[in-house]
Structure formats: C-alpha cells, structure tokens
Image (tube, grey):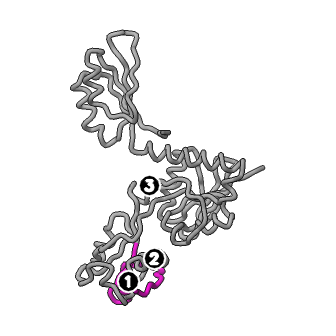
Amino acid sequence: MPELTIGLPKGSLQDSTFALLKKAGWEFTVRSRSYYPTCNDPDISAMLARPQEMSRYVERGTLDVAITGLDWVLENGSDVEVLERLVYAKATRQPVRWVLAVPEDSDIRDAKDLEGKVISTEVVELTRKYFKERNVNVTVEFSHGATEVKVPHLADAIVDVTETGSSLRANRLRIIDTVQESVTVVVANKKSYSDSWKKPKIDALCLMLKGALDAKEKVLIKMNVPCDRLEEVLKTLPSLNSPTVSHLADESWVAVETIADEYLVRSLIPALKSSGAEGIIELPLNKVIR
C-alpha cells in the first residue's frame, strides 16, 4: 500500500503543530523518547526531527513532506517545494524574526559599524548573506545555543531568533536590524509532489491545515433580525464575503449568520443587540476553507 512519510518538528513547535494537525483532522500521538508518532490516518507514517535538519531530509526523499521553518529551508539552501505558509509559532500567530542584536550600551548602531567584528549565530549562511549584501566584512561563528550570552565577551554581536523580543531584553540586548523573517511552512520533496497518489494527499493536508489555522481566531455569529432592522444590522457586520440571510417561517423575520474575528465579538454583539438583532449565538469554528 502507498504511504506518505511526514516530518514533524521536534522542540518548541512540536505541541502547537500537533494541536493544529489535530484540528485539521490528523491526530498524532508519540510515546516518551520516541521519534516515531502514530497517526489516525493509516496512509501516513511520521517522524520527529529538528526543524534545522528537516528540509535536507525532504530534499533527499527520506521524507515526502514536512512542517518546518522557512528560515531553515533558506539556511540549508534546500531544493524543495514550499507549498503553504502557516503563520504560527510557539506562542503567537506572528512571524518569528532573526535579528541582529548588540549589548544595549554598545556604540554600534547599524550593520556597517560591525566591520571586522565577530558575529555569533545558528544561521551562519543567512548571516553571511546579510552582511555580504551590505558589503560589510565580518567573521560569522556558529553558535551551539544560548546565543544571547555570547556578547560582549565571545562575540561583538549576535543574530538570534525572537518571537516577542522578551529574552533579548532580559539579557540587555538591543535589536538593530531584522536579518530574516520566518514562518512555518509545509515543504515537499519534488519527486513525491509529482507522484499521482502522494500529490492529492499532500494538497489535502495543506488545505486542511490552512483551514484549521484560519479558523483558530474566528467564530460564527448567528442571530434573528426583524426585516425592518436588517439594513441596520448588516451595516454592523463584518464578513468574509457577505453575510448569509435566510427567511424564517415568520416572514417578518430573517436569520443572519457571518464569520467574524473572535476579538471583535466583545464589541460586535452589543452593537448587534442595539441594532435590533435577537437570539444571538456565537459558535467556535474548526476550519475555514476559502
């Protein structure tokens, strides 16, 4: 039987990725210290791997498809199909950034001030490219972790990843530039993506992941509205396209439903009530397929 082999990120993205996959319809479970999760889809086998390495395994065909960071695809220079960008990280739904940072009391203000200096980072190739584009000669050294503590004694500056900037601030570091933004991506082996059985399976995975992610911060709002107040209510409502309006048994009333960002609900529902809507309900969504 054909099988799709998927790589899943081990580390900081693991829990949020497993939660998103479950919402999309694929539930993975993994035992302690195991690198081979089981899936509720018998057509899928899975392996946990570090995002830093994942794109290399996809390029060589060890994995058909994987969820990893765009930064590591670029760092490795991997020749893979980047199929979907999923904007989520460990703590937020924002892109992460690789930033150039120096001690907060440093005289360094921009990249040119680092001419002849030492930079410590995990993304050596991205950092070299950044400085080459600016014609700045630096020595880039690979950091095996705890990069933020390398300055000022072991390096003059660092390029480190940040989601909120809190760790850098806690270590009294000042960001002077963004080297690379990154999001989580679905990547596929080019041969696998041309396979007549694997391609539809990979496309379905991307579609459902994107739908689950798009639904994460949205809700469905349903209500009943008197026909003579409908125009006023419709002016209040946001929608992906336009609200759905359907007639009730009582022809003087209609049912209205729409999708809205969850953070808007705190002000939207009182406004709808004031506009004449009744029987307002808010429902969570599992997927929004555009």
- Give the Cα separation between the discs numbered 3 and 2: 24 Å
Give the label on residue 136, or none.
1
Residue at 72 percent of width and 48 percent of height: 196
- Mark 3 against mark 2, which lies toward the viewer? 2
Tag 3 or tag 1, which sits nearer the N-term?
3
Tag 2 or tag 1, which sits nearer the N-term?
2
Q: In which quarter of the image is residue 30?
A: bottom right
Task: From the viewer's side, name the closer residue of 250 and 132.
Answer: 132
Tell me if residue 49 comes above or below residue 139 in the rendering: above
Label 3 amino acid? Val
Label 1 amino acid? Val
Residue at 36 percent of width and 34 percent of height: 239
- Find residue 267 and report its horizontal and vertical position in percent: 24, 37
- Say whether residue 249 is left or right of residue 10: left
Q: Quadrant of residue 32?
A: bottom right
Residue at 40 percent of width and 74 percent of height: 160
Tag 2 or tag 3, which sits nearer the N-term?
3
- Find residue 162 and report its horizontal and vertical position in percent: 37, 68
Q: Is mark 1 on a helix, strand or loop?
A: loop
Residue at 69 percent of width and 50 percent of height: 198
- Find residue 93 and report its horizontal and vertical position in percent: 39, 54
- Find residue 274 and report its horizontal and vertical position in percent: 21, 26
Q: Give the range drawn in magenta.
A: 136-160
Residue with the mark numbered 3: 87
Q: What element carries label 3?
A: loop
Label 2 amino acid? Lys
Task: From the viewer's side, name the closer residue of 4 and 149.
Answer: 4
- Say whether residue 265 is left or right of residue 42: left
Residue 94, magenta (yes or no): no
